[in-house]
Amino acid sequence: MTTRKVFNIKTMAKVAILSVIAFILMYFDFPIPFIAPGFYKIDFSEVAVLIGGFALGPLAAILIEGLKIMLYMLFKPSSTAYVGELANFIIGCALVVPASAIYFKNKNRKNAFIGLLVGAISMITVGLLMNYFVLIPAYSFFFNLDLDTIIQMGKAIVPFINNKLTFVTFATTPFNIVKVVAVAGLTMILYKHISPLLKK
């Protein structure tokens, strides 16, 4: 057995373990009702994906993100015909791929901050676009909710929300900012403690 093959097996084992951890973390979601309507829920599965991406590279991050979503779809029936799960994958990758690519190229604290900042901007931008063009129409269709009903849910929290654009600007975007700050902060705290285990 070659060293390269052993390395690949070890790497895939780490990817698999981190995928399962991310999948489990995805179950522990909760809303932030004073920022966005209750159908937006935060979870910390991206922490496991980011740790994997930082340790193993951006390709590993994509694999962990994808396996996490596949496991979630396998064990929990989709209520949006898998549109929500696809969007979760795309928005998750928008964060973890640039963050891990920048850090993995030169592993130091400065690059970790830069990577997370670039990833955060990417995730917030992609999240806004995905919600405007895909997720909100999907929620409206699959939950049999009129678009105005969804907008009113946002308006109950932020009074000047009055259309889909203001909804994604003042409900979706603040929610994603809170999520990415929490995820990035936890990743920075945990990575140095966990990364030695991923080098073995």
Image (cartoon, grey):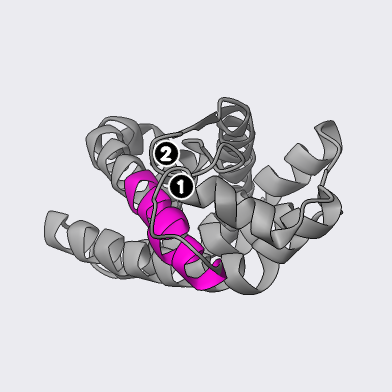
Which residue corresponds to the image point at 39% horizontal and 45% vertical from the top-left? 179
From the viewer's perspective, tell me whether residue 109 is left or right of residue 60: left
Query: Disc 1 vs disc 2: which is toward the camera?
Result: 1
Q: Is residue 90 above or below residue 13?
A: below
Q: Residue 195 or 51: which is nearer the viewer?
A: 51
Q: Secondary structure at mark 1?
A: helix
Q: Residues within 10 Å of mark 1 (few under 14, many from 20)?
A: many
Q: Secondary structure at mark 2?
A: helix
Which residue corresponds to the image point at 62% horizontal and 41% vertical from the top-left? 39
Q: Residue 144 or 76: which is nearer the viewer?
A: 144
Q: CA distance from mark 1 to mark 2?
A: 8 Å
Residue tagged 1: 52
Q: Name the disc covering residue 198, or none.
A: 2
Which residue corresponds to the image point at 81% horizontal and 54% vertical from the top-left? 82
Q: Which residues are magenta?
A: 164-179
The quarter of the picture where residue 5 lies is: bottom right
Q: Do tag 1 and tag 2 residues touch (Cβ < 8 Å)?
A: yes
Q: Residues within 10 Å of mark 2 (few under 14, many from 20)?
A: some
The percent position of residue 34, horizontal first and vertical second, equals 39, 36
